[in-house]
Image (cartoon, rainbow, N blue to C red):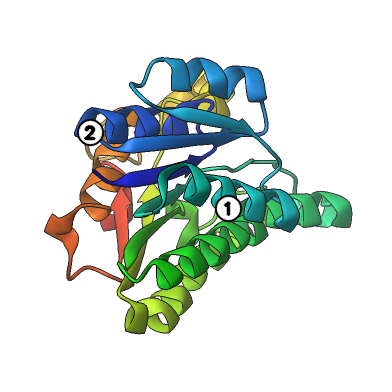
Amino acid sequence: MKVSLVTGAGSGIGAATARALGGRGDQVVCVDIDSDRVASVAAEISGAMSMGLDVTSKEQTDSAIRQTMENFGRLDAVVACAGIEVGAPALDLGVDTLRQVLEVNLVAGFLTAQAAAQAMRDGGRGGSIVLIGSINSHMAFPGSTAYSTSKGGVLMLGRGLAVDLAPFGIRVNVIGPGVTNTPMSGASLADPERRAALMSRVPLGRPAEPEEIAEVAVFLTSDSASYVTGAFVPVDGGWLAR
């Protein structure tokens, strides 16, 4: 049985990923800053545990990995789904906002991956780490400077980690969701004009459901993906193909 940890597991892609990994039979550790919400998700998954913590804190992240190892004795997979999106035109973008987005979307991903990789290395079994990038890892919308910068960084973080961690049998890959039906995208998808503009760019003509992103994370953390590392996997309905 694999032991998997998912950050941002309180909602959206993170919650769907935690449920999907639980459905595979994994022992799942659900992590989110909202302790009540993530506990509710964990309660749906047989044998899962939850932790409320701030993934931008190295101390709290290290503690989560340590508790996982103490409880289960191993860590096989980590999916770092925690993220935020704050939009503003570049000329109006405050440096504090930029730093906040980079801290949550990029730095926290590094902290999670680093702590997990240290545990995986010490365990001697290898493992798999999946980071959540975006189509914005490769392109930008108007007003998305902070978000696109962070997700471009996630892409290169994944590649750098894949190279550094390969000698320990640890694979690292990045998923690039397109427009997905999550609370983060709720306002855009609820606006008929904005939704139509977004969907006009998607060859499949609809947003993804969180479960469709989660299934790719399940594959990348499985033994079937044993030779996949350093990859960027777009799950975008064809957006980047245009």
Amino acid type for the residue under numbered disc 2: Gly
Identify the mark nearer the N-term, 1 or 2.
2
Give the answer, above or below, for where 236 lies relative to 137.
above
Q: In the rendered view, would you say 175 is above or below 237?
A: below
Identity of the residue drawn at 41% across and 28% down: 48
Residue 23, by quadrant, is top left
Q: Which mark is residue 25?
A: 2
Residue 166 appears in the picture as rendered: yes
Residue 70 x, y percent position in the rendering: 51, 48
Which residue is pictured at 28% across the width and 37% down the height? 26
x and y, in percent, of residue 167 in the image: 34, 84
Q: Is residue 161 left or right of residue 86?
A: left
Check disc 1 and give the amino acid type: Arg
Please tell me which residue lies in front, 72 or 136.
72
Horizontally, residue 82 falls left or right of residue 174, namely right
Query: In which quadrant is the N terminus drawn?
Result: top left
Residue pictured at 32% horizontal, 39% vertical:
213
Would residue 188 be seen by someone viewing this image from the given angle? no
Tell whether label 2 touches label 1 (CB within 8 Å).
no
Screen quadrant of the C terminus = bottom left
Can you tell which mark lies on residue 66? 1
Q: Secondary structure at mark 2?
A: loop
Residue occupying the point 62% across, 52% down = 105
How far is disc 1 from disc 2 in space, using C-alphas? 22 Å
Decide: few, some or many residues near mark 2? Use Cα within 10 Å; few <14, some 14-19, many ≥20.
some
